[in-house]
Image (tube, rainbow, N blue to C red):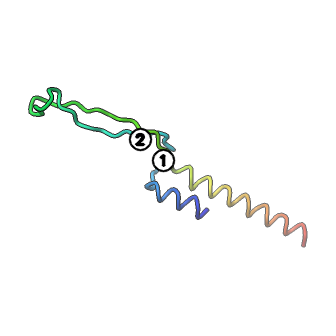
Amino acid sequence: MVLCLWVWIKDGCRIAFWKTSVGEKKEIPIVEGMPELGTQTQIIWREQFVCGIETPLLGLVFTAVLLFTFCLRRKKAG
């Protein structure tokens, strides 16, 4: 659970789903060297995994299953 929380916090605590690519916006002048005539936005996509809310939720479910299994086995043994 702690590992999943750490990975999620390291990636920025996004309350969204996982992302596999990140877009970087860059303003490019329409006429080279004359930005006063207007610019256009260029988006450059990079392949990068960014954790979402699923990461701590999966960690919580995995930890709960492990604890439940451990308690169930302990009860049967005792």
Instruction: Name the residue located 49 percent from the left edge and 40 percent from the top edge.
Output: 20
Question: Marks 2 and 1: CB-CB under 8 Å?
Answer: yes
Relative to residue 76, is residue 39 drawn left or right? Answer: left
Quadrant hosting residue 23: top left
Q: Residues within 10 Å of mark 1 (few under 14, many from 20)?
A: some
Under circle 2, the secondary element is strand
Q: Position of residue 29 (x, y in %)?
A: 17, 31
Q: Which residue is mark 1?
A: 50
Quadrant hosting residue 45: top left
Relative to residue 12, is residue 38 drawn left or right? Answer: left
Instruction: Name the residue located 46 percent from the left edge and 54 percent from the top edge.
Output: 11
Q: Earlier in the sequence, mark 2 or mark 1?
A: 2
Nearest the viewer among 70 and 75 is 70
Q: Position of residue 33 (x, y in %)?
A: 12, 32
Q: Amino acid at mark 1?
A: Val
Is the C terminus in the top left, top right, bottom left or bottom right quadrant?
bottom right
Q: Which residue is mark 2?
A: 22
User: How far apart are labels 2 and 1 at the CA level?
Assistant: 8 Å
